Image (spheres, grey):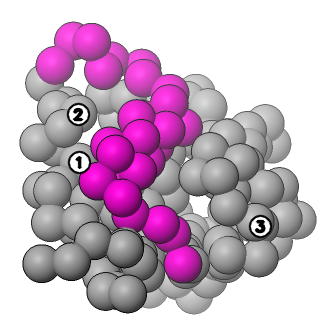
């Protein structure tokens, strides 16, 4: 059974009076949210890029352009579902996904389980196949200064297809 690895990365500046949603979880206590064309869910965007990369299907911008009006304020979980459908049509299965969020605020750990559940539901896998964790910039760089939110994802796909 062939395996494919993909990695994804996304970063959004943070602005006042914008909701912050990550993997379908709203963080109402956050005073800032991502400046973005869509809902700005950096975690899901990184995961989409990792999935597309593992399947050699380009990147998120090729599929969901930030200049296309139809994706303005788009729900990233819907984009993830569309991406996963594309990969399933090519016989890919998710072995696991490892996701990291880098931000000073809000605290991610209390919502990590719900985020895993939401992602697993969209991807049709068990929550134990998805890792969501966070770290801080510790005062360094744009994340440490609270200027942005960054997410990284790595996925392992399998397929029954042969070359």
Nearest the camera: 128 or 88? 88
Relative to 147, is 51 on the left or the right? left
Task: Answer with mark 2 or mark 3, whichever residue precedes in sequence.
Answer: 2
Nearest the camera: 62 or 28? 62
Query: Residue 17 appears at what percent x and percent y?
Result: 58, 27
Task: Verify whether residue 9 appears in magenta.
Answer: no
Query: Residue 13 appears at what percent x and percent y?
Result: 37, 50
Q: CA distance from mark 2 to mark 3?
A: 26 Å
In this figure, which residue is indicated by the disc labeled 1?
A: 60
Q: Splitting the image into 4 quarters, where does residue 126 fall?
A: bottom right
Mark 2: give few (<14), some (14-19) or many (20+) Cα within 10 Å. Answer: some
Magenta stretch, residue numbers: 68-95
On residue 132, which mark appears? none
Tell me if residue 8 comes above or below residue 30 in the rendering. Answer: below
Element at badge 2? loop
Q: Quadrant of the N terminus?
A: bottom left
In this figure, which residue is indicated by the disc labeled 3?
A: 127
Tell me if residue 44 comes above or below residue 6 in the rendering. Answer: above
Q: CA distance from mark 2 to mark 1?
A: 6 Å
The residue shown at (67%, 41%) is: 24
In this figure, which residue is indicated by the disc labeled 2?
A: 64
> Do the residues bearing badges 2 and 1 touch, measured as CB atoms within 8 Å?
yes
Task: Verify whether residue 84 appears in magenta.
Answer: yes
Q: Quadrant of the C terminus?
A: bottom left
């Amino acid at each position: 059974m062939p395996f494919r690895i993909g990695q994804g990365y996304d970063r959004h500046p943070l602005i006042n009076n914008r909701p912050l949603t990550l993997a379908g979880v709203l963080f109402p206590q956050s005073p800032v949210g991502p400046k973005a064309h869509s809902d700005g869910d950096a975690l899901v965007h990184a995961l989409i890029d990792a999935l597309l990369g593992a399947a050699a299907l380009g990147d998120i911008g090729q599929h969901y352009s930030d200049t296309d009006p139809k994706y303005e304020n788009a729900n990233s979980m819907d984009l993830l579902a569309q991406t996963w459908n594309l990969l399933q049509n090519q016989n890919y299965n998710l072995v696991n996904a490892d996701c990291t969020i880098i931000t000073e605020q809000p605290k991610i750990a209390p919502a990590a389980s719900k985020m895993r559940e939401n992602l697993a539901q969209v991807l049709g896998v068990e929550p134990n196949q998805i890792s969501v964790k966070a770290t801080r910039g510790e005062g360094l760089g744009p994340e440490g200064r609270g200027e942005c939110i960054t997410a990284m994802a790595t996925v392992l796909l399998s397929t029954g297809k042969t070359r």
